[in-house]
Image (spheres, rainbow, N blue to C red):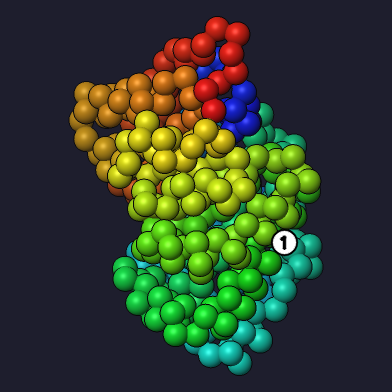
Amino acid sequence: MLRAYRGQPVDHMPVWFMRQAGRSLSEYRAVRMHSNLFEISRSPQLAAEVTIAPVRRLGVDAAILFSDITVPLAAIGIDLEIKPGIGPVIAQPIREPADLRRLRPFEPEQDAPYVTEAVRLLVRELEVPLIGFAGGPFTLASYLIEGGPSRTHTRTRALMYGNPRLWRSLLDALAGIALASLRAQALAGASALQLFESWAGILDPQTYRTYVLPSTVPIFRGLADLDVPRVYFGVGTGELLADMGSAGADVVGVDWRVPLDQARMRLGRKVATQGNLDPAACLAPWEVVRERVTDVLRRAGASAHVFNLGHGVLPETDPEVLRRIVDLVHQHDVITPEGAAVDL
Ligand code: CP3
């Protein structure tokens, strides 16, 4: 997987699934009966157990640390709760300059030692790379401003347009938190890093370039010395791909709304890709799943690609389908032009 992330030739296409450790696995549900998301995240042993389960069960080529994008915010004292079936809910949203004082810098080893401890535990046990992650500044800002999940992100966009100075300070503070968190995970042993900018697809390209990209570029630049592949992911980002490709990541995630070969044209040739099966396709009969997976593989061609879903595994997904997808992807011949590096 690390070779594919770097655009180097591979003998088979690597595959992992966003949210692979979550609610579709009985192993997770068993742990979850006794502990909530934050309790699992704060226990290196439980977090490690839940992180490893899908690697064993599904045969994926990478593990993703069990945690959440809101964990660093909770660790610096933001009063937030994860409501089952809803998502992160924040008691006192951030809407005014004075509210920014609550966003103090994040010091991973002091504020959340359990995260790096879980990483250290995992890299000793795992035979596949461990992916560390953080929330992107737009996505975290949206939760903080809205006070919870939002379909329209209206308050977020209103604050962005209405108070660009406050917006920029907020995004820079969140970018600092993301960078500190990602660096700490890499220094503890994570071999790749993913920035989940899940909700940026609500913006048009010009707005994204003006209000999000300037706070995001320093995150990827701030990781450059670590020599760890950097992945940049968002949902509904078809119109943003060219700009996301210029943010400084090595890999850009592509959801299912843009066919992979078209996404690659929008991205240019500098980055590898990851995705792009519709998570809902996993709920269809196997023949349909196979057709959809094969279509992604065909469109990937000889380009540097890591197979994944376009967004997280849906809770109702049968893990057996995911396991069969892993086999199917691994059986596929990656045709690399003779003597040439992968088509990046
Ligand atoms: O991918 C993995 O398996 C690793 C663990 C992981 C979780 N959250 C665990 C989790 C990762 C990488 C995340 C990232 C995350 N968290 C994102 C970015 C990815 C994406 O889906 O776009 C976002 C937006 C969040 C915020 C968040 N946390 C949401 C929207 C939810 C779901 C709420 C719900 O119940 O529908 C959470 C909670 C959460 N994070 C769960 C898990 C397994 C469910 C918690 C539970 O069991 O109740």
Give the labeled residue for mark 1. 180
Residue 149 visible to an observer of this rendering? yes
Q: In this view, does 99 lie above or below 56?
A: below
Mark 1: give few (<14), some (14-19) or many (20+) Cα within 10 Å.
many
Give how far across and how far down residue 228 sits, in percent. Answer: 70, 41
Q: Residue at x 62, y 23 (%)?
A: 8
Give how far across and how far down residue 309 sits, in percent. Answer: 39, 40
Give how far across and how far down residue 151 sits, in percent. Answer: 31, 68
Query: Where is the C terminus found, in terms of image quarters?
Result: top right
**Picture mark count:** 1
Q: In this view, does 285 lie to the left or right of 298?
A: left
Q: In this view, does 257 lie above or below 95?
A: above
Indicate yes or no: mark 1 CB to ligand 1 under 8 Å.
Answer: no
Looking at this view, name the residue that lies furthest to the top.
Answer: 338
Q: Which residue is drawn at 63% across and 26% down?
A: 3
Q: Which residue is drawn at 46% across and 78% down?
A: 160
- Pick whichever, 296 or 121, lies toward us: 296
Amino acid type indicated by mark 1: Ala
Residue 52 visible to an observer of this rendering? no
Mark 1, secondary structure of its residue: helix
Image quarter for residue 165?
bottom right
Give how far across and how far down residue 1 sits, in percent. Answer: 58, 29
